[in-house]
Image (cartoon, helix red, strand yellow):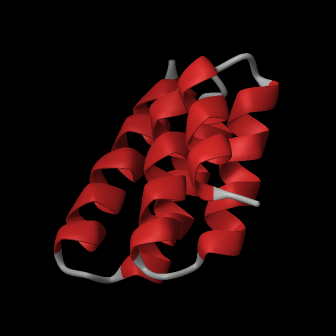
Amino acid sequence: MEDLRKSSDYFNKALVAYQQKRYSESITYFTESYNFDRKNIDALYNKAAVYFESGDKENACKVWLEISMLGQVNAKQLFLDNCN
């Protein structure tokens, strides 16, 4: 239960950092959120979106590929549409 709380806390910190255009910090927080709750796929989707929006297409593609390997169809489509 503690890990779920930490995951949620990091996710919320990531959203605030993103809104303040602190993209690197936001990515770090989304990563931590996912590390505390491996079912929190939204953290990975958001991490990829921040990478992409900040111009780091290479890392966005890596994250979309990672998510698609988890069976997420939307991530596979994002990878196909934006990578290669």
Q: How many marks?
A: 0
Q: Quick one: which residue is furthest to the right in this view? A: 69
Q: Who's the residue at 72% across and 30% down the image?
A: 68
- Dividing the picture into quarters, in which one does residue 8 lie? top left
> Where does the image place residue 35, in percent across and percent down from the top left?
67, 42
73, above or below 19, in the image: above
Q: Who's the residue at 58% across and 56% down the image?
A: 82
> Where does the image place residue 34, in percent across and percent down from the top left?
60, 40
Horizontal relation, residue 5 to residue 68: left or right: left
- Dividing the picture into quarters, in which one does residue 76 lie? top right
Q: Who's the residue at 76% across and 57% down the image?
A: 62
Horizontal relation, residue 58 to residue 36: left or right: right
> Where does the image place residue 75, in percent across and percent down from the top left?
60, 33
80, 39: nearer the viewer: 80
Horizontal relation, residue 50 to residue 65: left or right: left
Q: Who's the residue at 76% across and 60% down the image?
A: 84
- Dividing the picture into quarters, in which one does residue 67 lie? top right
9, 76: nearer the viewer: 76
62, above or below 77, in the image: below
